[in-house]
Image (tube, coloured by chain):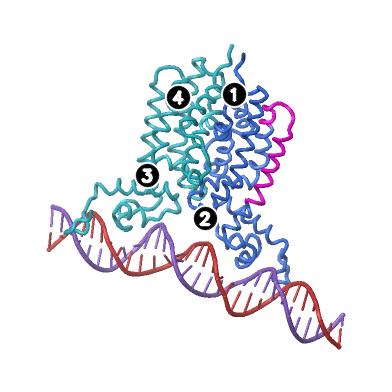
Chain colours: A cyan, B blue, C purple, D red
DNA sequence: GATACATTACTGACCGGTCAGTTATTTAAT
DNA sequence: ATTAAATAACTGACCGGTCAGTAATGTATC
C-alpha cells in the first residue's frame, strides 16, 4: 500500500470523499461525540492536520457526510412519489422495500440513529438535519398517503397526523439495527418484519369494507 | 438549604436516592457518556468522592437508576395484563394510555432514548438492559396480543412477529420527545398522536369483517 | 452534662489519560 | 525555486477515578 519511494502523495481531489467515507463509517460505528478525528484521518490514510485542510471543524465534516449521503436519496424518493403509476398501496410497498434496500443494508442508514442519539447535545446539527432531511421526508410520505386518500383506496384521514406513526416501525427497526442488535436479543428476520409491517399498516389505512 | 453553621451533614440513608435522582435527570438531559460525575454529585449536594462511597462506578450508578425507575413499572404492567377484565382492544388502549402517563411525561422515560443512543458504546449496560427490561417488556405485550387472538377479537398472527412493529410508534414518539423535539420541527399533539395510533393499530389487528 | 476519645461520612485536590484544534516544519509537484 | 499539500509535535481543556485529610456524629467516662 505504501509506495516505497514517496511517503505520501498530493491528492487534492480525492481527499474530501475519502474523508467523508471514513467519517461516515466511524460516526455510524461509534456515534458523533465518541468518534475521534485522529481515527477518521487514519482510516482515510492521512493525518489529522490534513483533515482540517478540507473541513473547518468536526461539525462541518458531519454536515458534508449528510449532504453527500442522504440528500440524493431524498431526491430519488421525491421523483418516485411524483411519477410512480399504480395504486397507492403499491406505491407504499415500493417505498418501504426501496427504503430498506437503500438505508437498511447501508452504512448511511446509521445516520438516523446518530441524530436521535445526539440531537440534544448538538443543537446546530439538529437544526441542519431538521431543515434538510426531516421536513422533506415528511412531505414525501404525506404526499404518498394523500394519493391513496384521493383515489378512495385509503379511508379519509389527515396525512400529517399519520406520517410519524406510519413511518415509526421502519425507523425503529433501523435504530434497533444500529444499537441493540448486537446484544443478543432475539429479533424477527427482516423479511418477516417488513411483510407484517406492510400488511398491518395497509389494513389500518384502507377504507372500511363497504 | 445550606445550614450556616455546618458545612455538611451525615445523611447516609438519604444519599443513594438523592444521587440516583440527580443521575437520572442528568443522564436524560445529556446522555450517559456526556454526563459528568462531578455534576451529578453537585446536583445531589455532595462531592464526587461521596458518590463513590455509595456506587462503585458510573456504570453501577446507572444500573441503580434503571432498577429503581423502570423495574417497578414493568411489574405494574404485568399485573395489569394478567388481571384486566374486558376485551383485548380495551386492554391495549389501557396499556397505551397508562404507558404514556407513566413514561411519557416523566424523566424516567428518557432512559429508553439513552439506551438506543449509547447501547453500542456500552455493551455491559446493553446486556443488563436487554435482560432486565426488553425481554420482560416483549413478553408483556405479546401476552396482551395473544389474549385478543384467543378471544377471536384479533385476526390470527404470531404475536412475537408483531410486538416490535406494534410498539414502535410509542417508542418512537418517546425517543423523539427526548431528542429532536426541541429543534422546532412541527409535531402533532400527543392526544391526537395516541388516538390515531390506537385507531390505526386496532384496525390493523382486528379480524376481517365477515 | 461536660469532656475526651473513637468512628465514619464527606471533601477536594490530584493524576493519568484523552481529544479538538493549532502551528512549525517537511516534502511532493511544477 | 517556489508553492501548496501533508505531517507531526504541541496546546489547553476536560474527566473518571483515587485518596489523604477533615469535620460531623456517636459513645464512654466522670
Residue beneath disc 2: B33
Have a look at marks 1 and 2 and say if they share a chain.
yes
Q: Nearer the viewer, mark 1 or mark 2?
A: 1
Image-quadrant location for residue A98:
top left
Spatial CA distance of label 3 from label 4 is: 28 Å
Q: Nearer the viewer, mark 4 or mark 1?
A: 1
Spatial CA distance of label 3 from label 2 is: 23 Å
Spatial CA distance of label 3 from label 1 is: 45 Å
Residue range (magenta): B66-93
Residue beneath disc 4: A93
Q: Is residue B7 magenta?
A: no
Instruction: Give coordinates of residue D11: x percent, y percent.
Output: 39, 69
Sequence-earlier tag: 1 or 2? 2
Q: Along the horizontal axis of the image, is A158 left or right of A41?
A: right
Spatial CA distance of label 4 from label 2 is: 39 Å
Residue beneath disc 1: B156
Amino acid at each position: 500500500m505504501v509506495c516505497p519511494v514517496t511517503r505520501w502523495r498530493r491528492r487534492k481531489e480525492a481527499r474530501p470523499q475519502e474523508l467523508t467515507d471514513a467519517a461516515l463509517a466511524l460516526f455510524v460505528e461509534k456515534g458523533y461525540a465518541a468518534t475521534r478525528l485522529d481515527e477518521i484521518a487514519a482510516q482515510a490514510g492521512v493525518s489529522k492536520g490534513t483533515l482540517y485542510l478540507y473541513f473547518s471543524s468536526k461539525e462541518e465534516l458531519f454536515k458534508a457526510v449528510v449532504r453527500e449521503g442522504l440528500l440524493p436519496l431524498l431526491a430519488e424518493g421525491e421523483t418516485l412519489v411524483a411519477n410512480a403509476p399504480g395504486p397507492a398501496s403499491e406505491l407504499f410497498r415500493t417505498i418501504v422495500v426501496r427504503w430498506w434496500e437503500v438505508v437498511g443494508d447501508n452504512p448511511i442508514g446509521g445516520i438516523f440513529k446518530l441524530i436521535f442519539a445526539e440531537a440534544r447535545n448538538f443543537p446546530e446539527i439538529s437544526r441542519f438535519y431538521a431543515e434538510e432531511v426531516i421536513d422533506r421526508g415528511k412531505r414525501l410520505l404525506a404526499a404518498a398517503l394523500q394519493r391513496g386518500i384521493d383515489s378512495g383506496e385509503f379511508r379519509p384521514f389527515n396525512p400529517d397526523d399519520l406520517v410519524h406513526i406510519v413511518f415509526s416501525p421502519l425507523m425503529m427497526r433501523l435504530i434497533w439495527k444500529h444499537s441493540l442488535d448486537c446484544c443478543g436479543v432475539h429479533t424477527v428476520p427482516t423479511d418477516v418484519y417488513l411483510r407484517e409491517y406492510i400488511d398491518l399498516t395497509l389494513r389500518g389505512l384502507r377504507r372500511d369494507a363497504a
